[in-house]
Image (cartoon, rainbow, N blue to C red):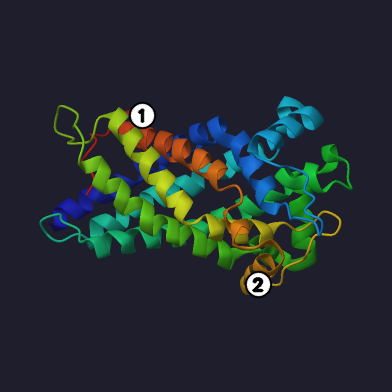
Amino acid sequence: MATEKKNMSFAVLPRVINGGIAGIIGVTCVFPLDLVKTRLQNQQIGPNGERMYTSMFDCFRKIYAAEGYFGMYRGSAVNILLITPEKGIKLTANDYFRYHLATPDGKLTLLMQCLAGGLAGAFQIIVTTPMELLKIQLQDAGRVGGHDLKKVTAWSITKQLVKDNGIFGLYKGVRATGARDITFSVIYFPFFAFLNNSGPRKPGPSGEAVFWWSLISGLVSGMSAAFAVTPLDVIKTRLQAIKKADGEKEFDGIFDCINKTLKYEGPKAFFKGGLCRMIVIAPLFGIAQMVYFMGIGERILGIEQKKSV
């Protein structure tokens, strides 16, 4: 068993490569939907029920009309840049913890699967928090107004945040991000493993699922986990939105955000952008898992792909 664990350490690099490639492809495909999700979640209902966007499709239409095709990809550069370490950490950490929490015969209890997923989610927030913070400011800039959109860049926002609060300025909303990502990973990874292990396998020694089954498993488990944590995502998104539109309320922490949202908008507000988020996460993780399990990193490095726990 000791030899097996030693050999496993050499598989970390290709897994990081797989996670990075998977993340870039996934984000490129679904980013416009993520932008719509962010704007719907940050939008607060006025005292007379007024709102900028009435639905997901209305939001799409208005963004495209006001900002054009490239406006749909506002904030995508920072997301694509940081998604490589983010997805690399998330997917590799889950595999790493699953391997080391497994019994000598390679089996994992449901509790250990949840623990491995939760630890992976906790590790990823090192990258996820600043990535999401910068992305949200760029995505929401067209909604809140008050500035020249061409002058709002990830670098200008980063400089201002660091100037005002030091490096910790980039970690605004880290607790809410952790709550969302740990909970998501606790649900997603065990469910994905169950589905992925139930499908047809590739011929040969790897024992991995065929790529289309990994895609389906990622779609279903991603959609389910995304819906379950939508309230946490709404809270995180609102806390990380630094600039508000005229008349919108400020929030002082997670519980203040929960109380004010319930008081002024009701329980339904916690599921704003929920459908959009499910549509985003399902293909994002479906594509990510399909690419990850195709073993592109192993092929690049000339390493034999081995079956994951």
Specify the quadrant of the image occupied by residue 16.
Answer: top left
Total numbered labels: 2
Q: Nearer the viewer, residue 20 or 270?
A: 270
Question: What residue is pinned by disc 1?
Answer: 300
Residue 215 placement (x, y as % from top left): 35, 33
Q: Nearer the viewer, residue 100 or 175?
A: 175
Q: Residue at x 30, y 58 (%)?
A: 97
Question: What residue is pinned by disc 2?
Answer: 259
Mark 2 surroundings within 10 Å by alpha-carbon count, few (fewer than 14), some (14 through 19), many (20 or more): few
SS for tag 1?
A: helix
Q: Nearer the viewer, mark 1 or mark 2?
A: 2
Which label belongs to residue 204?
A: none
Residue 246 placement (x, y as % from top left): 86, 56
Amino acid type, residue under disc 1 in the picture: Ile
Mark 1 surroundings within 10 Å by alpha-carbon count, few (fewer than 14), some (14 through 19), many (20 or more): few
Q: In this view, does 201 lie above or below 180?
A: above
- Mark found first going from the N terminus, 1 or 2: 2
Residue 155 placement (x, y as % from top left): 75, 47
